Image (cartoon, coloured by chain):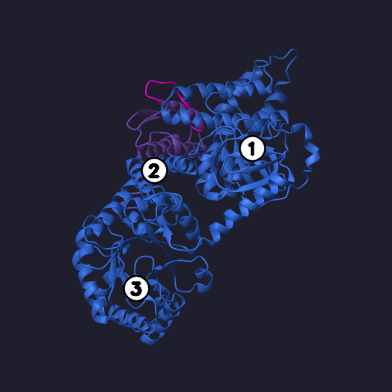
Amino acid sequence: MAERHAVVGSSVGLHARPAALLVQAAGRAPVKVTIAKEGGEPTDARSILGVLSLDARRGDKVVLAADGDGAGAVLAELAGLIESDLDAGEG
Amino acid sequence: MFSPAPQAAPGRCEAASSPVGGLRGIGVSPGAVAGPLIRMATRPAAGSAPPPAVEMPAVEVDVHGENAAARAALEAVAAELETRGTRAGGDAAEVLAAQAMIARDPGLADLVTTRVKAGWLAPAALADAFAHYRGILAGAGEYLAARVADLDDIRDRALAVLSGRAVPGVPHPGHPYVLAAVDLAPADTATLDPAEVIAIVTEEGGPTSHTAILAKSLGIPAVVACAGIASLADATVVLVDGGTGVVDVEPGAEALARAQAREDARRAALAAGTGPGRTSDGHGVDLLVNLGGAEDLTVIGAVGPAGVGLLRTEFLFLDRPDEPGLAEQREAYLRVFAAFGGRKVVVRTLDAGADKPLRFVTAPDEPNPALGVRGLRTARRAPGLLDRQLAAIAAAAEGSEAKVWVMAPMVSTPAEAAAFRARARAAGLAVAGVMVEVPAAALRASAVAAACDFLSIGTNDLAQYAFAADRMAGGLADLLDPWQPALLDLVRLAADGAGAAGKPVGVCGEAASDPLLALVLVGLGVTSLSMAPIALPAVRASLARHTLAHCRRLAAAALAAPDGQGARYAVAALAADQERVAAG
């Protein structure tokens, strides 16, 4: 089981568009990924309702976990998404 | 539009005739129209909806069948939302795609399966699975609580599919009708077609509700807060007056004729309301049109503008390898001047650069054209081009009755304004002003105004530069909202500065064509409004319903709002109040 920690970078938190982008990326991944707030219950990262239910705000720490081939690369990609400001256009 | 009532003979709905003959609500979008009413499938009010009662089965549950039915219902809802999003496009498409994502949520599907396996029927399993997430979201922060209404909407749609009932939503009966509903959600209104929905009546909502604002922007007569409308039977013919807020049930031929006459008069007044723009207490505001040079000028004369507030001249220069000659320019200007006789025509000198590059003057390698050599700045590189254009405008002005003013685009400093006026005067043009599109010019408006003869505020570019938001960037539309209080602050500064210098100040951007925002601009001290010809009658009518003191109150309300949407809502509510008081 591979794990990776990430800090939420979006100003609106893991809500709205950032949450949708994360869920879409998780849905494309070849392995099942879970996401949890640090110390909390993990939830399916492909579930928009699950991700929203985390109510992760900017600066919150989350834990991604996955099993199987390519898990490391998938977690790196998703952690990158979570840490960037997905709601900002650029700059 | 006064629509007949297709497939709805009056005799067909005698049972629905109201004993009182009329219902009363708040008119939020003017216009009178009659047609058969269709109720939108009701749904529980957002935010207060308990999940439907759970029915425990008395018999063995077909686990596989119930689970498949529940999943199929969710998928049908997702597909429908996606289709509607694609049809609507833009922001609505993104909103509806996000809702489709919820309907396809694997976590939700798992909860449904768990419940079906425990012996629940599909509707109960679905309702309870939604209730699980509803509880979490409702208990979280403000943003997530707002998603609860989305969740309820999707649940109701899925339950409707399961039970074979009509899916809640705006009906498409294939003929024009009056839409009745408890209230309308953004998902309902995204694809509203004014040719199909000829009027809207809701039980709930107020003058600033989503329904009211949407109806006004689409020009659909609407009444909100109309108790009793949802108890009428479908196909009942109603006469809706979005001005008075009265809804006549099964109106007689006489009432229809009276309403028709009133509506004809209202439309005629709107269309033929020529004459100068003025507030109801007689404060004059010049109402002008924006022209690009190639329009059919006879059509424009019909809306009765006081003149042209912005004559763009790029059309003469674009898509050609070299500069047009003096005779060619003169002829083109003269064509417009002649059409406007003794009225004012404000000619904007060439605004090349940025999104309008010019082969013979724009540098091909500017890293950031919107901040580069554009507008009046092109005169730094090619001063002769501006002087020749000014000479051609002066030559055309000599041959016509029009009062010809010239103005320069993209001016930032008093020195630039002074230099432009000096060149215009040298060419023989007596009135030369500048556009306020750069925040620096608004901040120093009194010095800029003192250096020339008038100011004209270009709200589109001013918003772009004040918010550092590219006008071509679709995702930044909220920042470019002409209602943004920070933009209105800059308009106020420009108007105050021009007023202090004793010079006229106009607005020739998008903002001037919004009948409500036009009131705010007048309240801020703007003395003329220039807009697309089609927008002029509505702006004239709006001004005529308010006093200057009202406009000032509306301006103060807009400036006090936290953001563009808040300003729009605050002003809509206050304006509706003022109109009701004025109408007695």
Tell me which numbered mark, 2 or 3, is placed earlier along the sequence.
Answer: 3
Do badges 2 and 1 share one subunit? Answer: yes
Instruction: Residue A43: say if magenta.
Output: yes
Residue B527 occupies which quadrant of the picture? bottom left
The picture places residue B488, in percent across and down from the top left corner, at: 33, 50
Residue B52 occupies which quadrant of the picture? top right
Which residue is nearer to you in this view: B140 or B215? B215
**Disc 1 sits on a residue from what chain?**
B
Q: Which residues are magenta?
A: A37-47
Kind of element beneath mark 3: loop
Q: Amino acid at mark 3?
A: Leu
Can the viewer see residue B196? Answer: no
Give chain B's shade: blue
Residue at image location 65% in from the left, 32% down from the top: B230
**Disc 2 sits on a residue from what chain?**
B
SS majority, magenta: loop
Tell me which numbered mark, 2 or 1, is placed earlier along the sequence.
Answer: 1
Q: What residue is shown with label 3?
A: B350
Residue at image location 42% in from the left, 44% down from the top: B568
Would you call the spot at circle 1 few (<14 residues within 10 Å), some (14-19), or many (20 or more)? many
Q: What residue is shown with label 2?
A: B567
Q: What residue is shown with label 1?
A: B180
Q: Amino acid at mark 2?
A: Ala
Residue at image location 78% in from the left, 35% down from the top: B14
Give chain A's shade: purple
Do badges 2 and 3 share one subunit? Answer: yes
The picture places residue B475, in percent across and down from the top left corner, at: 43, 49
